[in-house]
Image: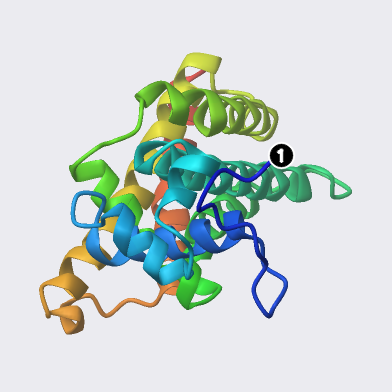
Amino acid sequence: MMAAPNQDTRNDSNGRSVQDRLIEAAEDLFCRRGFNETSVRDIAAAADCNIASVNYYFGGKDSLYMEIWRRRLAQMRESRLASIERVMSVGGQPRLEDLLRSHAISFFEPLIEGDRQCRFISLMAREMIDPHLPREMFVSEMVSPVLSAMTKALMEICPWLSETTSGVVILLIVGQLVHAVCARELFEQSGHAEQFKLKVEEMVEHIVKFSAAGIRAYATEGTV
């Protein structure tokens, strides 16, 4: 690819390409400030690149934002699919609690693994409140593949569940996880983090216990 006039093509001292620097800088700014409060000039300055680089490599701020999400959604999808596979590939009958726990941990990994990923939770919360992405993007790139794999696994462990009921149950579990993420963000952003005292590991166990009990309740009603 030939460089356009005034176009920055140099790697930095750590060998990071212009594209990688732009993505890292933009993600950090979007997480901290939000989409609307982050300008192309801000991104270019943080990445130590020319302003024209954003348009040249990504076609503008909107496309750069989508590329950040596309990469993140791919990471989340593969992490969640792997978490299901780990449980279902063990010898013997997989346990319901193990499936729910593994899925919940993969959902909360950005809260556990470190500061950069933890900041992405802020962007998730912002996107839920003020969306800038096409809804289809979430469904096709993450929701559908994970929902399909989780439904198959859940029905194998809990044969009394129908496919329809399994889908509803999974959506309710995801609802708990999303609500926990948003609640944590709300309390932290409002300066009342002390009111959300549960650690991530404790929250996972509460969700697992609550969800497993609800799923087993269907067994007393017969196949649904």
Q: Which residue is drawn at 40% across and 32% down?
A: 171
Residue sticking out furthest to the front = 5
Looking at the rendering, in which quadrant would you find the N terminus? Answer: top right
Farthest right residue in view: 91
Using the rendered image of the protein, determine whether residue 224 is visible from the camera's viewpoint. Answer: no
Q: Which residue is drawn at 24% across and 56% down?
A: 34
Q: What residue type is labelled 1?
A: Met
Quadrant of res 66: top left
Q: Position of residue 9 (x, y in %)?
A: 63, 57
Q: In percent of the image, x 22 and y 75: which residue is there?
A: 196
Q: Is residue 130 left or right of residue 91?
A: left
Is 60 left or right of 142, judged from the image as shown? left
Mark 1 surroundings: few (<14), some (14-19) or many (≥20) residues within 10 A: few
Expressed as whole percent of the image width and height from the top left, the position of residue 181 reads: 32, 58
Task: State how the image is colored.
Answer: rainbow
Image x and y of residue 172, in percent: 36, 36
Residue designated by label 1 = 1
* Foreground residue among 128 and 202: 128
| Element type at mark 1 | loop
Nearer to me, 92 or 185: 185
The image quadrant that residue 88 belongs to is top right
Q: Quadrant of residue 57?
A: top right
**Nearest the camera: 192 or 213?**
192
Image: 18 above or below 161? below
Asked if one can make out residue 57 in the rendered structure from this viewpoint, the answer is yes
